[in-house]
Image: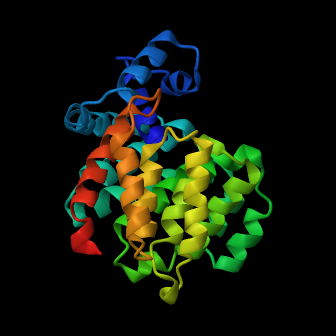
């Protein structure tokens, strides 16, 4: 979530002339980008961001049309669309369409970075696994960008067995990101792996205990600041294995926590809203 909303504000910060967006995205020292990024990531008004997001989606589409081979811009589009679909779209069909579009942007970015990984991602698992063995740290941003959008689409489409069939390749991709750069995006890849491994119970091929370890890694790597990781651990893991004490404890910790944490306030505010909803239905579920 943190990375997704960061990219959302980077689109907002692009010049009025829509020129030089890639420069802006790559410039960590820009005072304007820093200030606007801080303003949104530390925003506690979720409705304000939700209502403004469609304008960013249209804006990023236009930017990509003007510069279709800009890898950074494609990754921004992938993460922006994925964030919006996952966080704000309730209609499953619409969320699936937006998630698929996000995955398409991520795929195009991966193809610009590595033709080997690009081609192999459409082949059999064994071929993809061989290609992943050749990946290096310079491939990590594109791999993670594509993988995060892919994971968002799979989660949205979790009732579709065609989507579930893609899990082994997606898991292998994210595991490679963790291997190449442990702690990347403060445990972002671990958070996605936790979700992926807990989409199904063990009886149907899921790996809930491995998922729990990845969730706990994401919490640790963010120094506990990422409250969304605890919500996912409760929702995806504790509910899956029917562990109500763990479920309720995690959600209570999220609700009682101070959501204000640099770079996480917005996602933490969303996490607390979700935690209250889940906890209210805990006895009904268990």
Q: Nearer the viewer, residue 270 or 119?
A: 270
Residue 44: x %, y % from top left: 29, 30
Residue 183 image-quadrant placement? top right
Q: Nearer the viewer, residue 147 or 212?
A: 212
Screen quadrant of the C terminus: bottom left
x and y percentages locating residue 1 in the rendered image: 43, 44
Closest to the observer, 199 or 19: 199
**Residue 180 appears in the figure:** yes
Q: Give the x, y percent position of residue 158.
A: 38, 73
Q: Quadrant of residue 18?
A: top left
Query: What percent of the width, then of the height, locates residue 266?
Result: 35, 34
Residue 132, above or below 243 = above
Q: Is residue 238 above or below residue 253?
A: below
Residue in the picture at 71% in, 79% down: 126
Q: Is residue 89 above or below residue 186?
A: below
Q: Is residue 142 left or right of residue 53?
A: right
Query: What residue is at 27 percent from the left and 58 percent from the top?
Result: 279
When the figure is inspected, residue 156 is found, relative to residue 18, above or below; the finding is below
């Amino acid at each position: 979530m943190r990375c997704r909303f960061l990219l959302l504000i980077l689109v907002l910060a692009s010049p009025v002339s829509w020129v030089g967006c890639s420069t802006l995205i790559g410039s960590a020292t820009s005072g304007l980008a820093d200030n606007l990024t801080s303003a949104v990531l530390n925003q506690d008004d979720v409705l304000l961001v939700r209502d403004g997001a469609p304008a960013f989606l249209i804006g990023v589409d236009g930017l990509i049309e003007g510069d279709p081979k800009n890898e950074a811009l494609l990754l921004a589009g992938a993460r922006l669309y994925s964030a919006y679909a996952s966080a704000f779209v309730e209609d499953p069909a619409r969320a699936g369409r937006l998630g698929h579009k996000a995955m398409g942007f991520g795929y195009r970015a991966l193809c610009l970075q590595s033709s080997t990984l690009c081609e192999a991602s459409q082949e059999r698992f064994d071929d993809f696994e061989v290609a992943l063995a050749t990946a290096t740290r310079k491939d990590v941003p594109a791999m993670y960008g594509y993988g995060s959008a892919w994971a968002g689409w799979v989660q949205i489409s979790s009732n579709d067995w065609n989507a579930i069939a893609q899990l082994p390749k997606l898991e292998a991709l994210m595991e490679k990101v963790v291997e190449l750069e442990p702690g990347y995006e403060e445990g972002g890849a671990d958070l996605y792996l936790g979700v992926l491994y807990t989409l199904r119970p063990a009886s149907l091929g899921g790996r809930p205990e491995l998922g729990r370890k990845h969730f706990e890694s994401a919490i640790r790597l963010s120094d506990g600041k990422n409250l969304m990781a605890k919500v996912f651990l409760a929702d995806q893991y504790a509910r899956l294995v029917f562990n109500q004490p763990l479920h309720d404890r995690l959600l209570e910790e999220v609700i009682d926590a101070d959501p204000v944490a640099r770079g996480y306030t917005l996602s933490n505010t969303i996490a607390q809203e979700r935690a209250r909803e889940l906890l209210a239905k805990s006895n009904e579920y268990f």
